[in-house]
Amino acid sequence: MRVPECMAMVLEQPHGPLQLRKRPVPKVMPGHVLLEVGVCGVCRTDLHLLDAELPGIGYPIVPGHQIVGRVAALGQGVTSVQLGQRVGVTWLAASCGSCDFCRRGEENLCDQARFTGYQIDGGFATHCVADAGYVFPLPDGYTDLEVAPLLCAGLIGFRCLRLCGEQAHRVGLYGFGSAAHLITQVARWQGRELFAFTRPGDLMTQTFARQVGAQWTGGSDQVPPVLLDAAIIFASAGELVPAALRVVRKGGSVVCGGIHMSDIPSFPYSILWGERHLRSVANLTRLDGREFLAVAPRVPVHAQITTYPLVQANRALEDLRSGRLKGSAVLVVASNS
Ligand SMILES: [Zn+2]
Ligand SMILES: [Zn+2]
């Protein structure tokens, strides 16, 4: 039975903390669905939101963009999902569908795109509303908890890995958190070698990286024994860009996977020279989502999860910030998830 009220962890001002608020259940608009949230993953982007590092945040906002929920009401005209169906909601909440980017299949770059838990209330709540065209059916073999981290960490990681190029055999990962531990499993399954770089001296995370499949681990100040074909930077520290360029071979790629990064220090042209590529990954497309959710059960990708009740969202965010957390943090919203 639908509860008449919604409990939400709300960001009301820059730097928070999130406040537990009781609000009316959101109204479902035409073309949208109302979801009863089961669980919601916690992402570094939520920390950037908390720290007001993203432009144009409209307070109050409910964070959370790795949402697993069940359809509790259908807006007018929705036929693509059924009442009671389990679906996932990701970061991309909407795009215009008609601009040059959208028409080229680059809806992730659409200037009119809107994002869950940033411009539209997200899943740190018992209920949320999502555009029916942007929700995903989820693979049956995963529980709510297991599948939540795949919806951003896994998906963005997957897009980053693809942009390294199919020929990239030796891949470095800077920042070994949620995305890196998921994508290591995919990359190994694809036959690649993984090199994990952590904060210098973080032996606990290096041990974790080897457990999930990294062949080599070290601090971000170390140089691996061989040159890499590509590196993905998940950490938000700009000084990692020149560090990664220095360990990538000629013609190789450095892919920045985060939505925010501190300034990149100047570096000598010689470390970019030799046709090395440096690029960012921005958001995701629905095609990325469909492809990754098809690949994940075949690997199969398993998230290492730390759970928190919804009301402890602030603690989850601080654990993520401190680097204490191994793998992925997930908020448990419904008791039966
Ligand atoms: Zn995210
Ligand atoms: Zn567009």
Image (cartoon, rainbow, N blue to C red):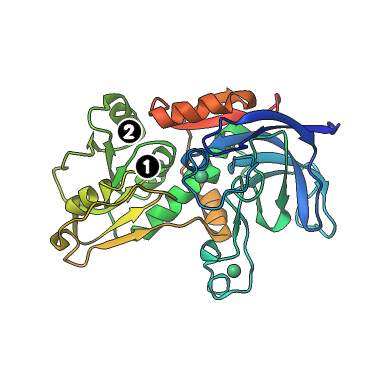
Coordinates of residue 303 in the picture (x, y in percent):
48, 34
Q: How many marks?
A: 2
Residue 78: image quadrant is bottom right
Task: Look at mark 1 in the image and give the residue it sits on.
Answer: 184
What amino acid is labelled 2 in the image? Ala
Q: Residue at x 13, y 43 (%)?
A: 225
Can I make out residue 333 in this image?
no
Coordinates of residue 249 in the picture (x, y in percent):
18, 57
Q: Earlier in the sequence, mark 2 or mark 1?
A: 1
Residue 321 - label: none
Q: Residue at x 58, y 42 (%)?
A: 66
In the picture, which quadrant includes the N terminus? top right
CB under 8 Å between discs 2 and 1: yes
In the picture, which quadrant includes the C terminus? top right
Element type where label 1 sits in the image: helix
Quick check: which quadrant has ligand 2? bottom right
Coordinates of residue 26 in the picture (x, y in percent):
78, 43
Q: Is residue 173 left or right of residue 314?
A: left
Task: Look at mark 2 in the image and give the residue it sits on.
Answer: 209
Residue 86: image quadrant is top right
Q: Residue at x 16, y 58 (%)?
A: 271
Q: Is residue 204 left or right of residue 224?
A: right
- Crowd tier of the residue under label 2, counting other residues whose Cα lies within 10 Å: few below 14, some 14–19, many 20 or above: many
Residue 32: image quadrant is bottom right
